[in-house]
Amino acid sequence: MWTLTENTFDPASQHHKETIFTIGNGYLSTRGALEEGYPGESRATFVHGVFDAAPIVFTELANAPDWLGLQIVLNGEKFSLAQGQILEYHRQLDLLTGLLTRRVRWQSPTGQTAVIQFERFASLEDEHLLCLRCQITPEFEGEIELRATLNGHVDNQGLRHWNLTRQGRKNGQTAWLEALTRQSGITLALAMRLLSSARSAFDYWDAEGQPTLRQVVHARPGETVTLTKFVGIATSRDSDHPLALALEHAARPQSWDSVLEAQRQAWAREWQRCEVSIEGDEEAELAVRFSLFQLLIAAPRHDSRVNIGAKTLSGFGYRGHAFWDTEIFMLPVFTYTAPHIARNLLDYRYLTLPAARQKASDAGYEGAWFAWESADTGEEVTPTWVPDFQDKKKLARVWTGDLAIHISADVAYGAWQYWRVTGEDDWYAHRGAELVLDTAKFFASRAEWLEERGGYGYRDVIGPDEYHDHVNNNAYTNILAQWNIETALETLAWLEQTAPQRAAELKDSLNLTPERLARWRDIAARMILNQRPDGLIEQFDGYFNLKDVNLADYEPRAKSMHEIFGIEAANHYQVLKQPDVLMALYLLPERFTPEQVRINYDYYTPRTDHTYGSSLGPSMQAIVACQMGDVEAAYEHFIRAARADLRDVRGNAGDGIHAASAGGIWQALVFGFGGLRIHPDGRWETHPRLPRHWKRLAFRFTLRGQHHTRSAR
């Protein structure tokens, strides 16, 4: 299954469909809004790194001037799905090539009928090129008027980010628009070049902020009129002369067929590295490929100054901010299939180390404390207040930016895993090691000696399970912090053996004195872990004393338990947003026995809000369930994650793709059902556990420069 299809137009679901029909190329993405527009649409194109100031959320990706606009007028009547009659409708996204196609047979209010087909893609071969083709086959004789536009009158759900600076026409077929973000001062330029099968000339309308090229064609029944729109796009992040660059890329294509063939070849190379197939389950196969596609179109290939936001580039949700979602959920996909992309994402963290150090310093700590929500500079952009679940007139305090310290260990884990999988010693020595060492420095600084416990721990934190805030000794946080410090010590020892000059540089710049390193060893050795003799780990101090909940008593429901109980009250119940402890066991399997995993799996699984908690949870739950041999339960969790966006099971897919879930779906397939295990010496093996109805599972991955394909039945 390589195609996502829609055979009826439902205005009530248009925001959901705009999200899942998003196209992109790693430089930008464009939501699946209709070229001609529709009332109430959530139309947007987001370009990596183009942030601008916004109230409450500090900064957000600015919805870029719109390149899609194409109005069609048939004998004086505008084509619109909001009027007239839709006689036939079909939309299809080809995941194999990134081509989005829509075919409509439409009858106007006065009876004019035509078949109209749109095709569009964002070039993967040339990231500064966007391509749109429209073919109109009238069933009447008369006049067809085509209006192709570049529209600078866009906003972010009411907030305008652009000052329109200039616009113009280069020749009879080319027009351009330039705009400047209001606060960040980023220039963006669009240039469109039109090709038409008709001979009539184009008129230029110099409408302010919306340069338009117009063509009028005589229509004859059955004779197709084809208009092709090539759009070049560039920003001042790419060049000192973005308009010249945009014009250059708009002028490059020789024909639609030539650029489409280049697109096919570029995507064939992409899928060659990461293709997956599942025989016997078309829904699961489509979901995994869709998830990979959405990650690939958001993945920066030529820019290490950006990261992938929690909603990719597909919607307004989370404003384009990046979270721990990248390192723990998305990054492994690229580490194992496209290391060059993974390195860009990690380089972003390296380049934002100054901001992470400043955040730690401002809070009175040493080392690097990464922002919970990060944008262009790496400074903390988590909003302090948001509307309350139960009363939108009230505000609820957001504590993750202040208390979710595990983000620094997550970044370190991503860097270490990348090194372990790729074997890129030079990168690790010059960048990754510093990430691991400076985050360890933070955790050592943040650790408290708890005299009554006889060990070190972390008070007043939030773990991945955000239903509980201001907790002490969150198990995930303590386990990952301990791992971070121990790995930093091992990393320094490795550097001293393999790159002594670099080791000396880091010891000097980070002030890694013998006394400091001795304290690190002591903290790691005496880190608190609330574990019973039978191996059951308490999620945080006092968790076992909270009120237990039988989630079945609240069914049926369409809300999270967080919403049902309320933000404050949820702290008093054992219900979890996501499988916090189980995630730590998955990430660090060498530290725990199968018996420990089993008892924690059995205890925490019925207490987790799988359906309406975090979208991050089901894929992780599926992996651990596979490890426990509970394959049917694993499939239930896996398919829940797989349907999150395609079926909009949470009702919020209109905000954008659940990117972490997309990455988790791939991990569940490869590490869960596929059973892939990587050993420290580079050896690998698989222990597949397939659902009964799967006939065959195949996936590809890269390990230390070698490409592998694994197939299991």
Image (cartoon, grey):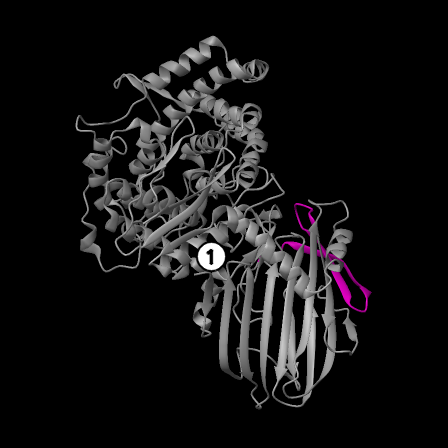
Using the image as rendered, state which of residue 639 and residue 190 is in the foreground. 639
Front residue (pair 458, 335): 335
Whether residue 146 sits left or right of residue 200 in the image: it is left
Q: Is residue 375 left or right of residue 446?
A: right
Which residue is found at the position 49% from the left and 60% from the top?
A: 19
Q: In this view, does 353 lie above or below 220?
A: above
Magenta residues: mostly which secondary structure?
Answer: strand
- In this view, 503 is above or below 165: above
The question of residue 449 being in magenta is answered with no
Query: Magenta span has 162?
Result: yes
Q: Position of residue 309 (x, y in %)?
A: 51, 46
In the rendered image, residue 308, in percent from the top left (x then y), is placed at 52, 45
Q: Which residue is drawn at 45% across and 75% down?
A: 8
Please tell me whether mark 1 sits on a helix, a strand or a loop.
helix
Q: Which amino acid does label 1 sit on?
A: Asp
From which residue to which does the magenta span run?
A: 159-187
User: In the image, what residue occupies the spot 55% across and 82% down?
Assistant: 106
Instruction: Name the residue that disc number 1 marks.
Output: 655
Q: Is residue 610 visible?
A: no
Q: What is the tally of numbered marks visible in this picture?
A: 1
Quadrant containing the N terminus is bottom left
Q: How crowded is mark 1: few (under 14 residues within 10 Å), some or many (20 or more)?
A: some
Of 612 and 659, nearer the camera is 659
